[in-house]
């Protein structure tokens, strides 16, 4: 059973317009759900060529979330956008950064120590947070069914997302500098709200 409430008529109309402009019918079900929700959230159809998804990773992430796995976000804005369930906000765990880390990276390091196995991670703000998560995974400190890696920025975002894709971690990412809390939250919401029958 998913977390989806009744769909408002405005949202129904919005998705109808989206689908009149963008044919996603050839995409696997959860990939389609993520792509459509990100496009719906941003009103930008060019996300289709930018997002990088993996259906098996999306299925694993969705199953983990529906089974009650922790959701860890880098910042409160991502957590606030996921309305169906609470999240642990890594930045709130940061304390005083050491070793030259940004507060975002320090928060991820602290969250990894508390949730080393099985959590779903959603990063939509700081590239340094994503870099730290990838580093922790490379050192065997964290195992996860899914990383939503969509940080935004002109400095480090493209490299962080490329590092995520190169790491072998199950992930959603994109190729460009854009990203942000809204699209990271939208990706998680797509998994939580996906129709049960459609993804079987």
Image (tube, rainbow, N blue to C red):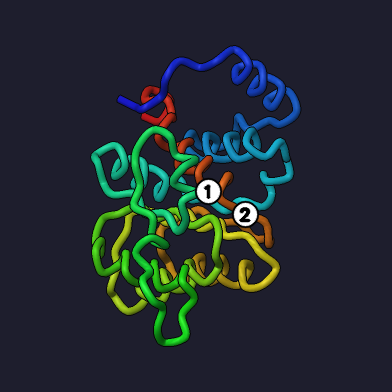
Farthest residue to the top: give it. 9
Q: Nearer the viewer, residue 165 or 66?
A: 66
179 horizontally vs 117: left or right? right
Q: Is residue 89 above or below residue 34?
A: below
Instruction: Give the percent coordinates (x, y) of residue 72.
Output: 36, 54
Q: Which residue is mark 1?
A: 184
Seen at 68% across and 30% down, the residue is 23
Does dot 2 land on a helix, a strand or a loop? loop
63 horizontally vs 180: left or right? left
Quarter the C terminus occupies: top left
Q: Is residue 95 above or below residue 73?
A: below
Seen at 71% across and 31% down, the residue is 22
Marks 2 and 1 sit apart, C-alpha to C-alpha, by 7 Å
Report if the CB atoms under discs 2 and 1 are less than 8 Å apart.
yes
Q: Nearer the viewer, residue 191 or 129?
A: 129
Seen at 41% across and 63% down, the residue is 169
Instruction: Give the percent coordinates (x, y) of residue 142.
Output: 29, 67
Q: Which residue is mark 2?
A: 179
Quarter of the image holding residue 108? bottom left
| Label disc, if present, on residue 19 of the rendered structure | none
Does dot 1 land on a helix, a strand or a loop? helix
Quarter of the image holding residue 150? bottom right
Quarter the N terminus occupies: top left
Instruction: Give the percent coordinates (x, y) of residue 146.
Output: 38, 54
Sequence order check: which comes first, mark 2 or mark 1?
A: 2
Query: Number of numbered discs present?
Result: 2
Q: Is residue 41 above or below residue 143?
A: above
130 horizontally vs 93: left or right? right
């Amino acid at each position: 059973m998913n977390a989806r409430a009744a769909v408002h008529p405005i949202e129904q109309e919005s998705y109808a317009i989206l689908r009149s402009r963008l044919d996603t019918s050839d995409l696997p079900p959860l990939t389609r759900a993520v792509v459509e929700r990100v496009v719906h959230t941003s009103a930008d159809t060019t996300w289709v060529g930018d997002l990088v998804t993996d259906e098996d990773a999306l299925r694993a992430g969705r199953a983990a979330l529906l089974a009650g796995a922790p959701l860890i976000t880098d910042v409160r804005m991502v957590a606030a956008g996921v309305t169906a369930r609470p999240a642990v906000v890594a930045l709130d765990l940061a304390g005083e950064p050491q070793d030259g880390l940004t507060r975002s990276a320090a928060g991820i390091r602290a969250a990894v120590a508390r949730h080393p196995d099985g959590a779903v991670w959603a990063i939509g703000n700081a590239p340094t947070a994503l870099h730290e998560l990838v580093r922790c995974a490379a050192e065997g400190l964290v195992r996860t069914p899914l990383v939503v890696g969509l940080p935004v920025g002109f400095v480090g975002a493209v490299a962080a997302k490329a590092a995520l894709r190169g790491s072998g971690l199950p992930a959603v990412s994109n190729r460009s500098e854009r990203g942000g809390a809204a699209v990271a939250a939208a990706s998680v919401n797509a998994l939580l709200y996906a129709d049960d029958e459609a993804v079987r």
